[in-house]
Amino acid sequence: MKCEHYNRVCMKGLLVVCGAGYTLLLLLYRHSIRVIFNRQLPPLVTFHTLDEENKQNLVGVEFPFLKSFVVHLRMLRPLEVIYRFVTARFRVLPDVLVLGEVRCGTTSLCEQLSLLPGCHTPFSLWKHPELDHKETFYFVGHYLGFVNTRYWSMCFPLKVVRWFCKKVLRRPFFTFDGSAQYLTSPTAPYLIAKAYKEANLPPPVMIACVRDPVAQAASWWRYENNAIDWGDGMGLKEWNHDLRPESYPPKRIADAIRKEYSSQYDALYENDAYIKGLVNGAAASNFLPAHMMTWPGGQLSAIGRNGKYHHNITRYERAFVDVFGRRENNMNYVTIVPLEDLSSKWMLQSTLFDAFERAPAPHQLSGILSEPNIASVGSKVHLPHRSSSIVTADATDMCTVDGQSLSASSVEVSSLSSSQSQDGVAEDGSKVVQRNIHRNAGSAMLDTSKEPTEEDLELLCKYFADEVNLLEKMMGSVNYSWRRPVMDR
């Protein structure tokens, strides 16, 4: 009798868990189609005549939703989301935040961080090679728009894991979030600062990857237009004009940065009073409004805003100064890493070491990286040897190494220099950065008629000129390889 009762209880529990999982899966699917892909939900069933020429009454049945649903079924993790939300209060917050920008080497940097001693990668809602173990997407609304700051920890390891690593194994421990949308997001900086304040924790190490904004905009344009083609391939035909305007998506880069088009989103990105009101509203309701999720105005509407690095970084500085006050010696909260530094082991390790040492709570990251020196870091770049190597490049970012066409920003190279061992420790015992860069793939557009023209690129040069000057003043250095307007050359 006891055994039968136990079996019934287990069966009921299993049914409840499966029911909750499939319910969340359906909600996430609907949310993804409407808010992330910016499309209307495809119909469940359609009927059509098979033989119209001979007027025979043969009726065909199609299920347009099926293709996109199967894709989401393979990529989403509803049961793990439920488990993590239930255990969120027992989890840690990240020690390092890679804020973005998209197409600026964030995937490469996160791969480097994941190879450091003691790193525990974050949870991603999406089981996708470009996103898994890197981006949580929490504060941009991928979890049905839920952004309660006390539940962000659901994406990170349990506190008992940190305790076991540090106290029992005597090993370093840290975790990170590499959500590349955070830098441009108008609401994320305020929500992130609030999360650390509520947890009574010091601010994390925050890193912003930057790149020539002209190249960034062109790369993002290609990437997102190919993503649109991916949506079309899933049978997502109609745009969600309940959320996005009739003019979305823009047809050309020039259209995206045209004042008549971009001004309709100015309040969503630039009006601090409006944004803080939304954040306070989200804090009360736990949800962001749909028009502020992912990219306000849609992914391609962010063209011209992603490359405003100085403006976006300054928003983070303001948000954290408001909550935590100014740092000693007026140090910035955000460390800036140009894409060019990712191709140099010496520069990358120096930047990360300085960022870790200047952290508001440096003891949390002690022992992870040793102070760089030429002997331990080395400088030689090796071509990939692992079977899982992925070498991809944007069409306009090609260079040549040892006679092979590669991209400095998207090359995966071997994880070992001649002076390194498999665990990221040099022969002299110092912890070093491993040169094992993997970046999400970039490729030429399938529709070549939309490829950025030289006129588009020159227009972007002029558009970003002032922002580049402000960023260089903030960094205290000049990015000589970045494109400048013709009049400045």
Image (spheres, rainbow, N blue to C red):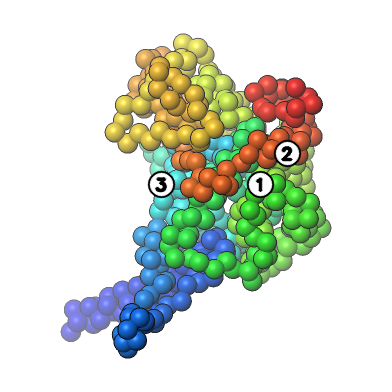
What's the amino acid at mark 2? Leu
Q: Is the residue marked by circle 3 packed among few (<14), some (14-19), or many (20+) residues within 10 Å?
A: few
Question: Could you tell me if the residues under marks 2 and 3 are in contact, i.e. CB atoms within 8 Å?
Answer: no
Residue identifier under label 3: 129
What's the amino acid at mark 1? Ile
The local secondary structure at tag 3 comes to loop
Residue identifier under label 2: 459
In three-dimensional space, the C-alpha distance between marks 2 and 3, rounded to whole angstroms, equals 34 Å
The local secondary structure at tag 2 comes to helix
Residue 265 lies, in percent from the top left, at: 74, 57
Q: Is the residue marked by circle 2 packed among few (<14), some (14-19), or many (20+) residues within 10 Å?
A: some
Residue identifier under label 1: 253
N-term-proximal mark, 3 vs 1: 3
The local secondary structure at tag 1 comes to helix
In three-dimensional space, the C-alpha distance between marks 1 and 2, rounded to whole angstroms, equals 9 Å
Tell me the mark number nearer the camera, choosing from 3 and 1. Answer: 1
